[in-house]
Amino acid sequence: MIYNTNLLNFFFVCITSLIFLKKYCLAEDLISGYHFSEPSTQKIQDDDFLNPGFIWVENGELLWNKKEQSSQLSCKSCHGAASEMTGVALKYPKITKKGNLINLEQQINICRNENMSAETYEPESKNLLALSVLLYYQSRGLKQDIKINEKNKEYFNLGKKLYFKKIGQMGLSCNQCHDERVGQNLRAEKVSQGHINGFPSYLLRWSKIASVHKRIQFCNEQARAIPFKIFSKEYNALQLYMTWRGRGLKIETPAVRK
Ligand code: HEC
Ligand code: HEC
């Protein structure tokens, strides 16, 4: 009989490992960070009235319609209602005419500067993130679907290289956590696949919205690596690679995380 229980145990271990592998480790299975959040956090995201990210959506809407003194123009003057911007966020990070890679927040600042004669917003400032959340929210439910072509390939390759590069005092790369340790606990958090389909996201620990670049800085700091600057070429390249890596995942902005 002992022999039988051992055999049963063996099969049990095999089957649970297979389920675990299927659920968390196979690259083809894209899982949104939502599924790694605690149920209490998920509940806040599920309810647009509870989700504090919607304060940013509302502020973004106010800013969208606000005319700047300098030009008497609002975003709406040129682009129409914010709802007209459905699908636009999916194209970012995007190559400019000059050949640089920029993200959506940088595009917002370009429009303010070049099209409205208004001062640019500081990186990670409330107003900039409010407009970014508003625009990503217009694409909520749409799938990430960025294309890699001759123009953005160089940045894509840089982003991919950075994703696999071992850095910092601990010599850790992004993939060592977000591919190899998926589902494991790390400082009371479950490591997710590190997708960006919920960004800009509301972080409960900071009681504010964070951009993709801010989140990557935080991961860098936790792994004792020196972060790059927000809007740096390196983070835009990483953002491009990560958007591609998560293609097929639906936008959830504003997502809620711990
Ligand atoms: C030491 C492990 C570790 C490393 C290395 C690491 N991260 Fe993270 N990362 C985490 C943890 C823990 C979280 C919070 C839980 C979660 O969402 O995975 C997180 C969250 C994220 C998220 C947010 C996911 C979401 O759904 O909100 C992104 C994006 C991310 N990391 C990207 C990166 C990138 C890019 C790198 C490499 C530059 C990196 N991480 C390196 C541990 C790590
Ligand atoms: C005077 C007209 C004008 C105003 C005002 C204006 N924009 Fe633009 N915007 C444009 C033009 C023209 C383009 C396309 C060319 C370019 O990329 O500059 C554009 C492009 C964009 C794009 C990228 C669209 C795409 O398909 O990639 C976004 C996002 C955007 N604007 C956001 C804003 C926001 C947010 C504001 C307000 C803060 C704003 N714009 C104000 C004229 C304007």
Image: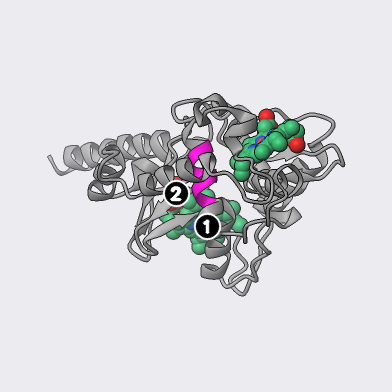
- Looking at the image, which is closer to me, 159 or 209? 209
Q: Residue at x 62, y 70 (%)?
A: 225
Q: CA distance from mark 2 to mark 1?
A: 9 Å
Residue 112 located left or right of residue 209: right
Q: Main secondary structure of the magenta part?
A: helix
Q: Looking at the picture, tell me which residue is in the foreground, 115 or 27.
A: 115
For the point 72% across and 46% down, which residue is it? 110
Disc 1 crowd rating (10 Å Cα; few below 14, some 14-19, many 20+) is some
Q: Which residue is rendered at x = 28% and y = 49% of the image?
A: 41
Q: Label 2: how many residues lie within 10 Å, few (<14), some (14-19) or many (20+)? A: many
Mark identifier at residue 161: none
- Quarter of the figure that contains the C terminus: bottom left
Is 134 included in the stretch rendered in magenta? Answer: yes
Q: Is mark 1 within 8 Å of ligand 1?
A: yes
Residue 71: x and y in percent read 69, 45
State if disc 1 and disc 2 touch (CB < 8 Å): yes
- Asked whether 130 or 67 is in front, the reply is 67
**In the picture, residue 102 is in which quadrant?**
top right
Task: Please indicate whether residue 133 sits to the left or right of residue 91 in the image.
Answer: left
Three-letter code for the amino acid on which mark 2 is drawn? Ser
Q: In terms of secondary structure, where does tag 1 sit?
A: helix
Type of amino acid under label 1: Arg
Q: Can you tell me whether the CB of the residue at mark 2 lies under 8 Å from the nearest atom of ligand 1?
A: yes
Identify the secondary structure beneath mark 2.
strand
Label number found at residue 201: 2
Q: Residue at x 68, y 40 (%)?
A: 93
Find disc 1 in the rendering and name its residue. 215
Q: Is residue 180 visible?
A: no
Find the magenta span and give its range: 129-135
Residue 227, horizontal then vertical, whole percent: 64, 67
